[in-house]
Image (spheres, rainbow, N blue to C red):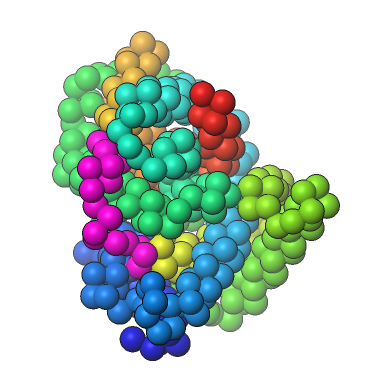
Amino acid sequence: MNVTLITLVYILSPVIIILLYNKFDWAKKVGTVIMAYAVGIILALCGVIPTGEAAGAGQMKSISDMLMNITVPLAIPLMLFNSDFRLWVKSLPKTFVVLIGGLVAIVTSVILGYFVFRNAGIRDFGDVAAMMTGIYTGGTMNFSALGLALHVDETVMSIALTFEMLVTFPLIMFFVAGGYKLFRKLLPYKENATNPASENIEIKDDSFEEYKGMFSKGVFGKMMVGLLLSVLILAVGAGLSLLTTGKLNELVIILTITTLAIAASFVPWIRNLPKTFELGMFFILIFSVVVASKFDIYSIDSSALAVMGFIAFIMLVALVIHLIICRIFKVEGDLFVVGQVGLLCSPPFIPPVVGAMGNRKVLISGIVIGLVGYAVGTYLGWLLSLLFTVI
């Protein structure tokens, strides 16, 4: 397939995905990221991406590398601008127990998994473990950011993300299909008190991915202001990297733009810019299609299967540790469930689960936990990568 045509597929397929997401309920249940990744894998399996010595392979790699290196740094500020981190102090008191317990559970399970699977022959294992910390405390955005910052091989990233979805998606389906009832029995507690301040918080939409109206009058221009701010923050990150390291260091850039974006979210007019989260998701979808298109089925060997075992280990051990912590602090079952979803899957997955449970009281708590995951996931992953380097 022509390199120009493939590039257009990379850029335009997210548009089609968003249109499907807006129109069909099944697309909402599947999720935009999973659909984007499916498109990339289909491209890879069809063999249309030129690789190796094939004509256009070098040009294709340059274009895909450029898209990967640009989309994530632009997406991070856009997705964080709309995050109202004031919710940290306005949410229900036990939300913090669930949040801290979840972070402890994930970090602990990743470290345990590192020692269990360290001799399984997984390539770039320390960095893969760091990326898993990122994705299970903030979703694909943090996974992508860490992969770029740590210079993880693209094939390894593709395999890890593929298996992560194969392991995590069934968990979401389990929750939505009624699995939350199990945790109501394991955690049969009721919230005794509410925080009055939390009752005054209004959530405009039940979904973080509300793409309708992005091009309407009065929205598009403000959304472009958000994009301009994201570009400026990226420029500051690049400049700081050049000043401190003498080159464009992805780790310095990612950590800088994450920090600046969080700070910017406290400015009311920036936080109120419409549809910046959705625009950021558009860039993440481009990244997802590109990285998935690098999937190589012939790279599925014993070490690749070990990655799947490692991911399943993290998820299950984290769930058990988190459950124990919540049991000790008498957290109710529904709050535990949204905490799990907020960390393991990110905020966009919260509303469908809340809707299935029929308990909107935990919506804000789930969103808070997911937002904090967005904010701290990249930092935690980076710190663990340093730890594994020392080990």
The residue positioned 59% from the left and 66% from the top of the image is 70
Quarter of the figure that contains the N terminus? bottom left
107 up-or-down from 127: above or below: above
The residue positioned 53% from the left and 79% from the top of the image is 216
| Region of the chain picked out in magenta, as a range | 292-312
| Front one among 221 and 30 | 30
- Number of marks: 0
295 up-or-down from 61: above or below: above
The residue positioned 80% from the left and 47% from the top of the image is 244
Q: Residue 15: percent from the left, percent from the top?
A: 41, 77
* Residue 364 visible in the snapshot: no
* Residue 162 visible in the snapshot: yes
187 up-or-down from 225: above or below: above
Q: Residue 91: percent from the left, percent from the top?
A: 52, 32
Q: Residue 47: percent from the left, percent from the top?
A: 27, 75
Q: Is residue 308 magenta?
A: yes
User: Outermost residue toward the top?
Assistant: 328
The residue positioned 16% from the left and 44% from the top of the image is 177
User: Outermost residue toward the front?
Assistant: 53
| Front one among 103 and 268 | 103
> Residue 238 lies in what quarter of the image?
bottom right
Secondary structure mainly formed by the magenta segment: helix
Residue 336 falls left or right of residue 285: left
Residue 305 falls left or right of residue 112: left
Q: Is residue 175 magenta?
A: no
Q: Residue 176: percent from the left, percent from the top?
A: 22, 45
